[in-house]
Amino acid sequence: MTDREFEAQRKRVRREMNKWRNLMGLGSWAFSYVYCREGLDVPDGYAAEGRTCLMRVNSAWEYCEAEIAISMPMMLETPDEELSRICIHEMMHVLVAELREGADDIRHEERVVTMLTKAAMWMMEGAALGERKKLKGKAVA
């Protein structure tokens, strides 16, 4: 990955993260981002064997702080729509982080966060469809 590609992806990720951070009510949290030029390790208990890790969240929920590590080479191959889904997923981890307290195996959290992400995306798609239907029924002046 060239420096130019890295910087373009960094801006793209940061823009999308900031968008979802605010939309999901996390604007008061302190976020930091770690942009990794190489892939991220998947700690034991974090994902099924053989899964890759595009982003990883560490949260100090009691202080409303979160750090998100991002695998920049994987960003090059990630379409915008998929990036939105991933950002929502990672923000959901921030929202439920305190439920993990002391757990080394977060597979249950992954399932909950995955379903919450799907629910959020279905709601957005439904809202967009409703708006299109409303606009379709109105005459344009």
Image (cartoon, rainbow, N blue to C red):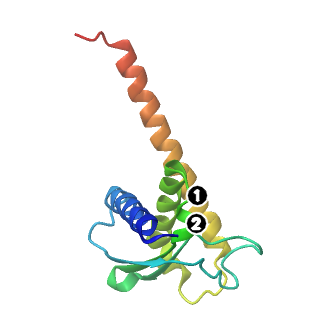
Measuring 27% from the left and 12% from the top, which residue is drawn there? Answer: 140
Identify the image quadrant of the C terminus.
top left
Q: Tag 2: residue type?
A: Met
As drawn, the residue found furthest toward the left would be 141
- Of residues 51 and 27, the one drawn nearer to the viewer in this rendering: 51
The residue carrying mark 1 is 77
As drawn, the residue found furthest toward the bottom would be 102
| Residue 21 image point, x, y percent | 36, 63
- Within 10 Å of disc 2 (Cα), the crowding (few <14, some 14-19, many 20+) is some
Is residue 72 placed above or below 100 in the rendered structure?
above
The residue carrying mark 2 is 74
- Of residues 111 and 57, the one drawn nearer to the viewer in this rendering: 57
Measuring 67% from the left and 74% from the top, which residue is drawn there? Answer: 107
Is residue 25 placed above or below 69 in the rendered structure?
above
| Residue 57 image point, x, y percent | 49, 77
Q: Tag 1: residue type?
A: Glu
Q: Are marks 1 and 2 in contact (CB under 8 Å)?
A: yes
| Residue 32 image point, x, y percent | 36, 79
| Residue 29 image point, x, y percent | 31, 74
Q: Identify the secondary structure beneath mark 2.
A: helix
- Of residues 123 and 42, the one drawn nearer to the viewer in this rendering: 42
**CA gap, disc 1 and disc 2:** 6 Å
Measuring 39% from the left and 16% from the top, which residue is drawn there? Answer: 136
Task: Specify the quadrant of the image occupied by residue 62.
Answer: bottom left
